[in-house]
Amino acid sequence: MRRPLAARDSTLPLHAVLAFGGLNVVFGNAAVAVSSPIEDFTVDYWDRSLDVKVRAPFVLAQAAAPYLEASTMGRLIFTSSTAAFRGIPGQPAYAASKGG
């Protein structure tokens, strides 16, 4: 089940349980990138990046935990990026949030 995840949306695991009868795996691969010189980089860009790549996976994991614990095969899988270890010019929030 693919669906964009808002930073405070905790209903996705419930939708999966209702549609499929349970939840065994949650795979998160969130990304949003804004490329801008630091002097033009806004707090809104920063917040959006951290909402998508740090807050949303936390909210998803927290909401999915009871269903995954009820499963004998419950797993949380989240991808990151090499940018977590080596920044990308013009994308400070991307690197910071991927290392989150």
Image: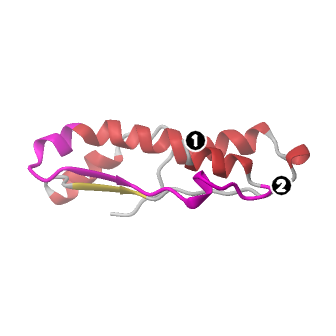
Task: Assess disc 2: are there few (<14), some (14-19) or many (≥20) residues with their C-alpha within 10 Å of its C-alpha.
Answer: some
Q: Position of residue 3 (x, y in %)?
A: 42, 59
Which amino acid type is marked by label 1?
Answer: Asp
Q: Residue at x 60, y 53 (%)?
A: 85
Asked if residue 37 shows in the view, the reply is yes
Q: Nearer the viewer, mark 1 or mark 2?
A: 2
Which amino acid type is marked by label 2?
Answer: Ser
Is residue 97 magenta-colored?
no
The residue range painted magenta reads 66-90
Q: Position of residue 77 (x, y in %)?
A: 34, 54
Which of the numbered marks, if any, corresponds to residue 77?
A: none
Q: Is residue 38 above or below residue 83?
A: above
Q: Which residue is mark 1?
A: 51
Q: Residue at x 32, y 38 (%)?
A: 63
Asked if residue 7 shows in the view, the reply is no
Helix, strand or loop under label 2 = loop
In the figure, is residue 68 to the left or right of 91? left
> In this orientation, which residue lies closer to the viewer: 96 or 67?
96
Considering every residue shown, the one lying at the far bottom of the view is: 2
Q: CA separation, marks 1 and 2?
A: 18 Å
Name the N-terminal-most of marks 1 and 2: 2
> In this orientation, which residue lies closer to the viewer: 34 or 84?
84
Task: Assess disc 1: are there few (<14), some (14-19) or many (≥20) residues with their C-alpha within 10 Å of its C-alpha.
Answer: some
Considering every residue shown, the one lying at the far right of the view is: 39
Quadrant containing the C terminus is: top right
Q: Which residue is mark 2?
A: 36
In the figure, is residue 100 to the left or right of 94? left
In the figure, is residue 69 to the left or right of 82? left
In the figure, is residue 79 to the left or right of 90? left
> In this orientation, which residue lies closer to the viewer: 54 or 14?
54
Considering every residue shown, the one lying at the far front of the view is: 85
